[in-house]
Amino acid sequence: MVVKTKDCTSLNDAELGEMADLCAERAPGFEIGFLSKQREEWVLVTHAREGNKLRGYSFCTLERIGGTPSLLVGLASIDRTTRAEPALKAIMADQYRRALLAFPDEDVLLGTRLLSPEGFRAFSGLIDVVPSPGHKASGEERAWARRLAKRFGAESRLDDRAFVLKGDGSTAGGLDFCGPKVKLGDGVPELFKGLNADKGDRMVAFGWAMAEDLAGGKLGR
């Protein structure tokens, strides 16, 4: 698996077409026009390839939200094959490496929108992941959900107790990962009860990458 990250501004139309083909015949159907807009909204794009085959990609931005170092994954899509999980791990490992360079010796918040329970695999190795089964979110955690929803341009559609962004009928970004034989923790599928990803519903989720784990290169491995 070969992973490369570059500025979104350097994405060409051929690459966008290849990215759109990854989920052209299935939901969420990120089409080339939509991906072209993502190129304008996010700073970095990561590609994971195996030979000449694109296995996954991710748009992200490294920024501070209220002073807090943050890695925001605006949109990601992973090919639904037996190579799905290695592709996701490789992409996340490269983005964590970038986070370490941008925020040395600091804990970093990973925030994204999930389409399905399997998307929580992106948070492997992180602590204080929210939402989580059996966890009652604190006021500060709900505030983080609102901050992230605002950053994703959907603050008015957030249920900050269920951490769900209701779809508005348009295509919505998020982390599209649904590899075969992915093991889920107890209670994780229940978090998505009532969420309709096909209609644009998304779950706001976040967790913390500890500075020592980033420095040790443990995350995404």
Image (cartoon, grey):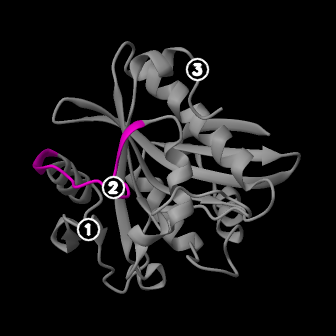
Residue of label 3: 217
Residue occupying image coordinates x 65% and y 68% = 20
The residues bearing labels 3 and 2 have C-alpha atoms spaced at a distance of 25 Å
Q: Earlier in the sequence, mark 3 or mark 1?
A: 1
Q: Which residues are magenta?
A: 127-140
Percent x, y for residue 70? 33, 36
The residues bearing labels 3 and 1 have C-alpha atoms spaced at a distance of 32 Å
- Label 3: state its secondary structure: loop
Residues at discs 3 and 2 in contact (Cβ within 8 Å): no
- Label 1: state its secondary structure: loop
Q: Quadrant of the C terminus?
A: top right
Q: Nearer the viewer, residue 211 or 40?
A: 211
Residue occupying image coordinates x 55% and y 15% = 216
Q: Earlier in the sequence, mark 2 or mark 1?
A: 2
Residue of label 1: 162
Residue of label 2: 131
Residue occupying image coordinates x 29% and y 78% = 166
Dividing the picture into quadrants, the one containing residue 4 is top right
Residues at discs 2 and 1 in contact (Cβ within 8 Å): yes
Dividing the picture into quadrants, the one containing residue 23 is bottom right
